[in-house]
Structure formats: C-alpha cells, structure tokens
Image (cartoon, rainbow, N blue to C red):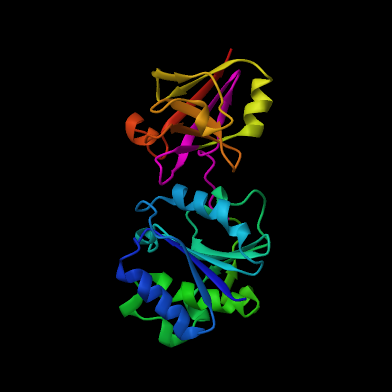
Amino acid sequence: MSVITLISDWKQNDFYVAVMKGRILGLYPQATIVDISHQVDAFSITEAAFIIKVSYSSFPKGSVHIIAVNLENQLKQEEIIAKYDGHYFICSNDGLLSLVFDHEPDQIISLENDHYPKEYIGFRYNSFPAFTKYAHAAIHALQSKDINELGRPVPDFIRLMDFMPQIEGSAITGSVVYIDTYQNAITNISHDLFVQIGKGRSFNIMLESMYHKLNKINTSYNETTDGELLAIFNSLGLLEIAQKNGRAAEMLNLDIHSSIRIKFL
C-alpha cells in the first residue's frame, strides 16, 4: 500500500490542499492520500509535531508523511526528507522533527533543485515548495528509491529543546502542546516523568497561575461533577487538563505553550 499522509496549516477548504493532492496523483495515480489534519494553527510547528508524533506509527511502514506547516519561512530554510522508524518525513528544517523523533533518524537529506525534473521547478511555483519538491520526494520514497538521490546528506537538523518539561527540585514545569476538539489541554508532561519526580508525594498542579490548582489525578472523566476542572493522564500517557462537560482551555484561556506547573509537597 502506497500511503502519503498530509498535515498542514492550510485549512481543509483551502485550494492549497487540492493542489497538493493533485500534484501527487498526477505523478503517482496509485498513491493513497490520507488527510491527518489541515487545521493546524498557522505556523505552529509545535502543534504539527504533536499530531504527527502520536499518529505516524498507526500507518504502515514505508509511509510518507508530508508536514506542510510554516511554509511562509521556507525561503530562509531548507526542505528535508528524513527516514525514521521505517517511515519518511518531509518538512522544513525548522526544528519540527526534533519534537517528533525520540532518537536519531536513519537519514536526513536536503531536497535540492538540481535533483528534480526541470518541469517541476520554476518561478511560478516557488512560493510553495510543497507543491513541487514535496510531491516529487514523496513519490521517490514510495517507490523505494534511494533518498540520497534527492539531494545532499544533512549532518544534523535543527533542534528545539525548549519544549521539554523543566525539572527544578520537586517541581515540573511543562507546557500545553495540543488542544483537542473538546478544548482539553494536553501537556508535554508524561506519566513516567510524573511518577519519577513525584515519588508518590501529594502535589498541586498550577494552571498558568496560583488561582486554579488541582491536587488529584483522575482515572476517568466521570469522577468529577459537571463543570469541574480535572487532571488526567490520557491514552497517550500525557497529562491533560479538562473540564467535565465543559471546555477547559477556553475557560482557563489556555493556549499552546501555556505553562502548567506541578509542585510536589
């Protein structure tokens, strides 16, 4: 099965989505294109990284994942294809992949113009390389061709470490990395980290300030009454702030990068 997934900040009804799909199918009609999300907030590589990190492994090995986010800045950044865990990832070298990968990728290749058919490279299309380079590189990888043929090896990729939780003595300071359809705020604080630092102690979870505090972890959403705030480790093993039959992120004015601090007592 030849699977190409798409993540973008274009929004579902934008013509960019159709152009991207048309370019892929024009090159490789048998490709199966799966929309993961086109609702990423504009330029939010953090949100895009979270979405692809938790979803890519559900697809068959050999799948290609195009992450067309923050393309406005591509005139300043190189476009790359990386092979990791049996999958291929195509995006800008802007730090996004450092938020996806847990270890070093097998390969990272810079996508260079002189490795593409001339008909795909031209002034008319240069504002969005995804329409040209991304589609061609994706098909190249799907056909099990050597991705070294697409450009030169990149010795390293840009890394963003600021999105990792910070440990300060008996406290963890994390941040919101995703807000789902129900306005639940998902953080980058894992259950493993919580157990490791907490050592079974009681705690307070501060939501952006001392005004809202939680001192209990729910095992289900139904343990609280309607309208009450709650903390729970979700199916991804990440701390989530929610509101029973409510919209926690909206109520608390939480956004991606909002601070969540746990103080163990």
Residue at 45% from the left image edge and 85% from the top image edge = 26
Please say whether residue 155 is visible from this viewpoint. Answer: no
Tell me: residue 26, above or below residue 239.
Answer: below
Q: Is residue 101 above or below residue 61?
A: above
Q: Which residues are magenta?
A: 157-186
> In the figure, residue 234 lies in which quadrant?
top right
Is residue 62 visible in the rendered structure shown here? yes
Identify which residue, 152 or 173, lies in the foreground. Answer: 173
Residue name at image x 59 percent, y 42 percent: 235
- Residue depicted at 50% across the width and 58% down the height: 93
Which residue is depicted at the point 55% across and 29% down?
Answer: 166
In this picture, residue 1 sits left or right of residue 29:
right
Q: Quadrant of the N terminus?
A: bottom right
Quarter of the image with the C terminus is top right
Q: Nearer the viewer, residue 161 or 10?
A: 10
Left or right? Give the position of 72 relative to 111.
Answer: left
How many numbered marks have been drawn onto this rendered protein structure? Answer: 0
Counting from the top left corner in percent of width and height, residue 71 is at 38, 61
Q: Is residue 147 magenta?
A: no
Residue 262 in the image, given as x and y percentages of width and height: 53, 22
- Check if residue 174 falls in the magenta segment: yes
Q: From the top left corner, tell me how far across and down residue 101 is, in percent.
A: 61, 51
Of residues 93 and 7, the one drawn nearer to the viewer in this rendering: 7
Q: Position of residue 208 (x, y in %)?
A: 40, 25
